[in-house]
Amino acid sequence: PSAPEAFQILEIVFGTLFTIEVVLKILGLKREFLHHGWCWFDLALVFCWLADFVLNGNLLPLDSSLLRLPRLARLLRLVRLARTIQEFDSLVVMITALRRSLQALLWAGALLFILQLIVGLLLSHALMYYIKDESVPLSGRLLLFEYFGTFSRSMLTMFELTLGNWVIPARALMENVSGGFVFINIAHKITLGFAFIGVINGVFMHETFLATQSDDAIMVRNVQDRRRMHARKMREFFAHADVSEDGVISKDEFRQVLSDDQVKAWFAAQELSAHDVDVLFDLLDDGDHQLTADELADGVARLKGVARTLDLTILLNEQQELKEELRQIAAVVRSAMRV
């Protein structure tokens, strides 16, 4: 019984909070307030609420309850905050994919509409003879008119044949017109309902993958996740290899643990070759002939994948510089020998 009064109190509380928020934005942003669309949106909502509250709904030609609906649009601003929270990555991917696939959606919808328009007009024109034929039972004529009697009915039926329950209108054509419509309906379902719609779904899947690969926030978090996973795996390997439990791995312990074929296969899965154990240990070691957990994680990360390619590129550049310096030295030596 007291629900209306409670909702009225809540409306006053939230309306007051929204008003204070807008005032603080104006004081804080000053002229910058005018350059944000959301700020204008908030200002309009607060103005409408104040006018409705002060004048008891007599100013605006709308029901005051309708003014509460646009406030839900403020929740869209939470999407921007979702980009910074890892648990909302799936939501960010979906929103980004939908935004980037909007152009593809428009073109696909236009093409599908044109194809449905052509087929629908042809069917509507062809079936009009059956609808007007008085020798055809009235129930069948009424059913055909329900599906193909007008342009709007025909277009709705065509989209039903393509995207919805296509069996019902297809069976109506087969039972009331001709059995040859079986092949026409099946051909329409295979071409438009299966192949064309499948291509559209593939385009949206492609846009989703592109959104995942190109979104900066998600890319950064994916790299961070891979680093954390790599560090966890290295800690597990370090705990397994540190037989003496002294916090470091000696070369003997390293040889012993890598004598296991499963460990070698695990290293191969980490994009590292463990055929020459001593060489691998020297590459991971910083010169003190023992490996700590941090040395192991950093060393493996340095030797695998993109980091390894970067090191090779740096090495090639240094080699080119060294060759150029040797050429200069050789030229100076030759000139000195001539003198």
Image: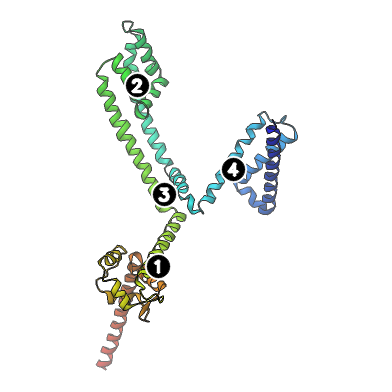
Alpha-carbon span between mark 2 and mark 3: 39 Å
Q: Which of marks 2 and 3 is in front?
A: 2
Earlier sequence position, callout 2 versus callout 3 = 2
Instruction: Please indicate whether residue 325 sits to the left or right of residue 55 in the image.
Output: left
Q: Nearer the viewer, mark 4 or mark 1?
A: 1
Tell me the crowding category of disc 1: few under 14, some 14 to 19, or many 20 or more residues within 10 angstroms, Cα based: some
* Relative height, residue 304 to residue 16 (above, below): below
Alpha-carbon span between mark 2 and mark 4: 43 Å
Q: Nearer the viewer, mark 1 or mark 3?
A: 1
Tell me the crowding category of disc 3: few under 14, some 14 to 19, or many 20 or more residues within 10 angstroms, Cα based: many
Q: Residue 235 carries which label?
A: 1
* Relative height, residue 262 to residue 318 (above, below): above
Earlier sequence position, callout 4 versus callout 3 = 4
Report the residue at 36% width, 39% height from top: 201
Image quadrant of residue 55? Answer: top right
Q: Where is residue 82 in the image (x, y as percent from the top left)?
A: 52, 50
Q: Hey, what amino acid is under mark 3?
A: Ala
Q: Dot 3 lies on which element?
A: helix
Q: Residue 211 carries which label?
A: 3
Report the residue at 28% width, 77% height from top: 278
Q: Dot 4 lies on which element?
A: helix
Q: Which of marks 2 and 4 is in front?
A: 2
Report the residue at 41% width, 53% height from top: 214
Earlier sequence position, callout 1 versus callout 2 = 2
Q: Hey, what amino acid is under mark 4?
A: Arg
Instruction: Please indicate whether residue 100 sits to the left or right of residue 186 in the image.
Output: right
* Relative height, residue 118 to residue 290 (above, below): above
Instruction: Please indicate whether residue 244 sits to the left or right of residue 12 in the image.
Output: left
Q: Nearer the viewer, residue 195 or 249?
A: 249
Q: Where is residue 323 in the image (x, y as percent from the top left)?
A: 29, 79
The residue pinned by badge 2 equals 168
Q: Hey, what amino acid is under mark 2?
A: Ile
